[in-house]
Amino acid sequence: MKIKLKLDKITEKIIGVSIDIHRELGPGLLESTYESCLVYGLMETGLKVEQQKPLPVVYKGVKLDCGYRLDLLVEEEVIVELKSVEKILPIHKAQLLSYLKLSGCKVGLLINFNVELLKSGIQRIVNDYPDYKRANKEQNNY
């Protein structure tokens, strides 16, 4: 439960800073602009942020550099994948889920800044998130 609270606090800060950026700059800018602003804003809140962090693939026990890069890795636990596109596609979600699996991280945020209201551009993707399976079972009455 402790890790869940920690991850929730980190994602809340990321979302808060993202909303502030979107309110000030609005939609329509390049992804790299939002990325730079988000790095700056998150570091101002005291969070550790790694930008364009390489993500190797381990295949048959060998670590291979395949050119994958995480837009942001926050506090070594939350992956942030940024977009500035007309619409989030299933492949964007699949990409973030693959990054979560490859990195061992449990939660990621997919944030599309090219929307009128940022709340509609944020999606939380989880991989083996604490209490996630149990909460879904209870919710769906399995």
Image (cartoon, rainbow, N blue to C red):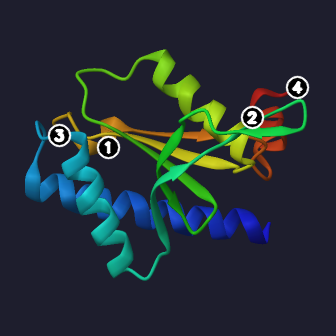
Q: Name the residue under label 2.
A: 139
Mark 4, Cα crowd under 10 Å, few <14 / some 14-19 / many 20+, is few
Residue 135 position by quadrant: top right
Q: Is residue 98 left or right of residue 46?
A: right
Spatial CA span between label 4 and label 1:
30 Å
Question: Of discs 4 and 1, which sits in the foreground?
Answer: 1
Residue 4 position by quadrant: bottom right
Q: In this view, does 75 lie to the left or right of 92?
A: right
* Vertical order, 61 against 26 (above or below): above
Q: Which amino acid does label 3 sit on?
A: Leu
Q: Which amino acid does label 2 sit on?
A: Gln
Image spot of residue 69 (x, y percent): 50, 43
Spatial CA span between label 1 and label 3:
19 Å
* Vertical order, 6 against 28 (above or below): below
Q: Do the residues labelled 4 and 2 touch (CB within 8 Å)?
A: no
* Vertical order, 82 against 35 (above or below): above
Q: Which residue is drawn at 55% across and 49% down?
A: 54
In the picture, the quarter occupied by the C terminus is top right
In the structure shown, which secondary structural element does the residue marked by tag 4 occupy?
A: loop
Question: Of discs 1 and 2, which sits in the foreground?
Answer: 1
Spatial CA span between label 1 and label 2:
23 Å
Mark 1, Cα crowd under 10 Å, few <14 / some 14-19 / many 20+, is some
Of callouts 3 and 4, which one flags the residue occurring earlier in the amino acid sequence?
A: 3
Which label sits on residue 8?
A: none
Of callouts 1 and 2, which one flags the residue occurring earlier in the amino acid sequence?
A: 1
Q: Name the residue under label 3.
A: 30
Q: Name the residue under label 1.
A: 119
Q: Mark 4 points at which residue?
A: 142
In the structure shown, which secondary structural element does the residue marked by tag 1 occupy?
A: helix
Image spot of residue 20 (x, y percent): 22, 62
Q: What residue type is labelled 1?
A: Lys
